[in-house]
Image: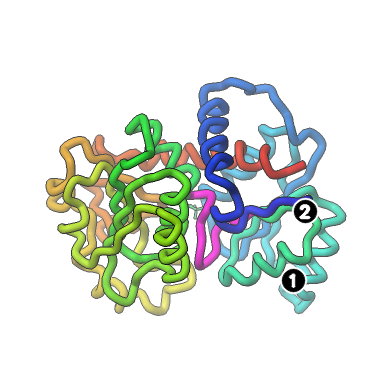
Amino acid sequence: MKRDFLTLQDISSDEFHAIVKRAAEFKSGKDRNACPLMGKSIGLLFDKTSTRTRISFQTGIYQLGAQPIYINSKELQLGRGETVEDTAKVISRYLHGIVIRTFAHNTIEKLAANSSIPIVNGLTDLHHPCQALADMLTIWEQKGTLKDVRLVYVGDGNNVANSLIEAALHTGVDLAIACPRGYDPDRNIFEYVKENGGKVQLYTDPEDAVKNADVIYTDVWISMGQEREAERRRQIFKKYQVNKELLSLAKPDVIVMHCLPAHREEEITSEVLDSPQSVVIDQAENRLHTQKAMLELLIQ
Ligand code: CP
Ligand code: NVA
């Protein structure tokens, strides 16, 4: 049976931990020459721009012995009206897996329902599960544990926040989300995780939320596809900037995370992003290792 990775709910908590552990092994250089996906082809179907996701998947797939095929979806017949369903059925006959980055989450659900090969979510408007895998490896490296680490996400309750909420359920991370009213994370995801014992709390005041923070995390205020709302969003999110003053309210050894790309001087100051407390470049590197571990688990 093929396995998809559309959200973090598609894997068990044991599998989540196994991916983080295996990623650390890959990172240490163990199994440098292992090629578990030898001879396979994996498509990368992108509707949105990307630096980290695209390059880390291309490199990781190659390192696992498979061939990555980058596809700008505008160049497919999809762009001229061929349906997602027909496209999915046909490319399933050529490929062994597809990583897709798109807008509506429903598009990847449709792709998954009509494909006989694993579909991996490389970001939708609703979820960014590959990011959360790398984030948890990064926190584990920095703090030595995930359980009860106080992770405070400050800013927009977007795809990155939604996947962090699901990661909290798998890991026992103590997650606080501070966002303006009306910009909360997805209610269904939040309620599901809370009902199932995840430690997640919502705040509107970032200063309240960051008290005792081990990790402060932020993301852009204007996600891909929201460009038309840019000016309004800049006003609404103003007091949610991660800066020196906000950091001073957290634990002295707080670390700072950002999935990148960052809009410097908007959601985060350069002073903080470039400070020794910032682990954003390690975090970006960890995309490579965690995605390799996830693909090894999923692709047969
Ligand atoms: N963090 C992340 O997904 O970056 P890209 O948009 O560059 O892929
Ligand atoms: N929330 C951002 C994440 C980019 C990696 C976006 O969707 O644009």
Question: Is residue 131 left or right of 46 when viewed as pictured?
Answer: left
Tell me the amino acid under the disc marked 2: Ile
Tag count: 2
Q: Locate residue 96, reporting x and y percent.
A: 78, 48
Q: Locate residue 16, reporting x and y percent.
A: 54, 42
Label 2 sits on residue: 117
Tell me the amino acid under the disc marked 1: Val
Question: Is 165 placed above or below 28 here?
Answer: below
Q: Locate residue 266, reporting x and y percent.
A: 27, 61
Quarter of the view holding residue 157: bottom left
Residue visible at 78% across and 33% down in the picture: 38
Q: Which residues are magenta?
A: 120-131
Q: Sort mark 2 into few (<14), some (14-19) or many (20+) by Cα contacts within 10 Å.
A: many
Residue visible at 56% across and 37% down in the picture: 19
- Give the number of the disc on residue 84: 1
Q: Sort mark 1 into few (<14), some (14-19) or many (20+) by Cα contacts within 10 Å.
A: some
